[in-house]
Image (cartoon, rainbow, N blue to C red):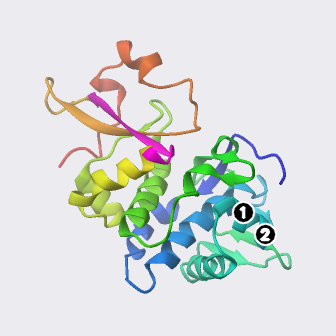
Amino acid sequence: MKKLPSWVRLPSAWIQDGGLRELQWEKEFGGDKIAALMALMAIAHNADADSGISQVTYDVLCKATSLSRSKLSNGLDTLEAMKIIDRAPNGRSTYQLCNYDRTGGWAMMPAGRLYVGGRIAGLADFRLRSPTELNALKLYFLFVARRGRDTNLANISFIKINEYAAVDPAKIKAATSLLASASLAYTERVPSRINEMGISNAYRIFGLESYQHMGTRGRGQDAHDFDWSDLVE
């Protein structure tokens, strides 16, 4: 497997436009939707920085995601149907990230630090049988898209999470707990702008600007440092 950069560009307009809402859990097909997001991670990690085309074999994708070939194929079908990728733009084993434009409309997604032995370590224990896994990956992509570069955190309320990703607020805690146990994203407590004595949740993505976190900024950081537009209910 080639050496991956520390982060890659992920087209994010489809997430900002509510595309994650289409990925609803269904008993028969829920696993395919989990596989789709797992596959998208690995494709984005291997995409060319200029073109957004990923040249990567099934074997590499299966190893990176810990998916079987049949589940990977189903996941790729889902991504193609949603117009998130185009398959075989340059022949076999190539995938185009749709609407890729390195000048804008993208979010930073961590890459190299997620891997151990050619696998995305945080995905190794996903079994594609639980709606919590789907919710967790939807939140992961949402947090990547909504991360503020000034704070290195995604500041977004439960109401807005439901609006963007159709995750039931009652199920968000289970999903964020899974992200934390998988070392993909962590919940941090930040000062509330609505109530000066209160605190709110924000979400830090593992592998992005790890030097910038509450331990390095917390003492001098107050409510005015955050983008609170998505926290107003």
* Dominant secondary structure of the residues highlighted in magenta in the image: strand
Q: Nearer the viewer, residue 66 or 159?
A: 66
Q: Residue furthest top?
A: 219
Mark 1 element type: helix
Does 183 appear in magenta? yes
At which x and y percent is residue 33? Answer: 49, 75
At which x and y percent is residue 77? Answer: 61, 83
Judge whether 171 appears above or below 77 on screen.
Answer: above
Judge whether 125 appears above or below 191 on screen.
Answer: below
Labels 1 and 2 touching (C-beta < 8 A): yes
At which x and y percent is residue 105? Answer: 57, 55
Residue type at tag 1? Lys
Q: Specify few, some or many for label 1: CA neighbours under 10 Å numbering under 14, 14-19, or 20 or more.
A: some
Instruction: Give residue 53's mark.
Output: none
The residue at the point 47 percent across, 25 percent down is 213
The residue at the point 84 percent across, 51 percent down is 2
Judge whether 4 appears above or below 78 on screen.
Answer: above
The image quadrant of residue 225 is top left
At which x and y percent is residue 101? Answer: 67, 58
Q: Relative to 47, is 225 on the left or the right?
A: left
Residue identified by numbered label 2: 59
Residue identified by numbered label 1: 63
Residue type at tag 2? Asp
The residue at the point 80 percent across, 66 percent down is 56
